Image: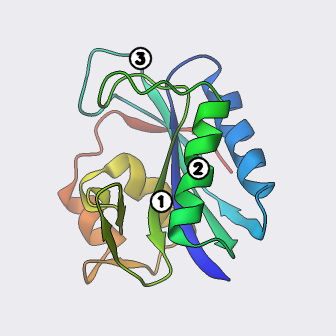
């Protein structure tokens, strides 16, 4: 079984319900267990700023799925929950990203692990630190990257 970290985000519809439904569907995947969940954070949009605020969180899972299989399952969950890929960094019912998968690196056109922008995004780093405080990213602690990233516009929405 592999240890993986997934980020979840939503800024359309019932955002909190979208996150909860996604976690339930991830828990229902073959050979996959949700081990821990961060608090939910409300964050200002990143990339395309003229849209509603996001709810973001991270989960830690163990899975028997390969990185490719996990990606395909997560894309399927996004579709089931109404995700439409129209505008890059645009509004979405749910966004599921593989941040870390064990200690491996994957560099494929549609799958990059560790996630290439993990160290730039406080809305990922803050919830990740809750459930993986000792983790390092590119040889540095999460706390190091948090100090470099702007955390303006990020607040706890629902404590785990």
Residue 114 falls in image quadrant: bottom left
Identify the image quadrant of the N terminus.
bottom right
How much space separates mark 1 and mark 2, taking CA atoms? 9 Å
Above or below, comparing residue 128 to residue 91 in the picture: below
SS at mark 3? loop
Q: Which mark is residue 52?
A: 3
**Residue topped by disc 1:** 98
Residue visible at 35% across and 29% down in the picture:
44
* Image x and y of residue 138, in percent: 25, 78
Q: Is residue 37 left or right of residue 58?
A: right
Above or below, comparing residue 29 to residue 12 in the picture: below
* Image x and y of residue 23, in percent: 71, 48
| Residue 158 can be seen in this image | no
Residue visible at 35% across and 16% down in the picture:
51
Q: Is residue 101 left or right of residue 147?
A: right
* Image x and y of residue 29, in percent: 76, 58
Determine crowd level at label 1: few under 14, some 14-19, many 20+ residues with C-alpha closer than 10 A: many
Residue visible at 31% across and 23% down in the picture:
87
**Mark closest to the chain's N terminus, 2 or 3:** 3
**Mark closest to the chain's N terminus, 1 or 2:** 2
Q: Which mark is residue 143?
A: none
In front: 82, or 9? 82
Disc 3 vs disc 1: which is toward the camera?
Answer: 1
Q: Is residue 9 left or right of residue 143?
A: right
In front: 158, or 128? 128
Disc 2 vs disc 3: which is toward the camera?
Answer: 2
SS at mark 1? strand
In front: 125, or 74? 74
Question: Residue at the left extreme?
Answer: 148
**Residue topped by disc 2:** 74
* Image x and y of residue 37, in percent: 65, 57
């Amino acid at each position: 079984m592999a240890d993986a970290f997934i980020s979840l985000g939503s800024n359309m519809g019932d955002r909190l319900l979208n996150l909860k439904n996604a976690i339930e569907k991830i828990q229902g995947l073959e050979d996959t267990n949700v081990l821990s969940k961060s608090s939910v954070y409300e964050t200002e949009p990143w990339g395309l700023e003229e849209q509603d605020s996001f709810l973001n969180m991270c989960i830690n899972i163990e899975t028997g799925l390969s990185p490719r299989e996990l990606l395909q399952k997560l894309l399927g969950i996004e579709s089931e929950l109404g995700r439409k890929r129209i505008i890059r960094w645009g509004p979405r019912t749910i966004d599921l990203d593989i941040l870390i998968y064990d200690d491996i690196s994957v560099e494929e056109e549609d799958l990059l692990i560790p996630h290439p922008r993990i160290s730039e995004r406080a809305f990922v780093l803050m919830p990740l630190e809750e459930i993986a405080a000792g983790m390092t990213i590119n040889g540095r602690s999460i706390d190091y990257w948090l100090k470099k990233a702007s955390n303006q516009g990020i607040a706890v929405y629902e404590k785990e």
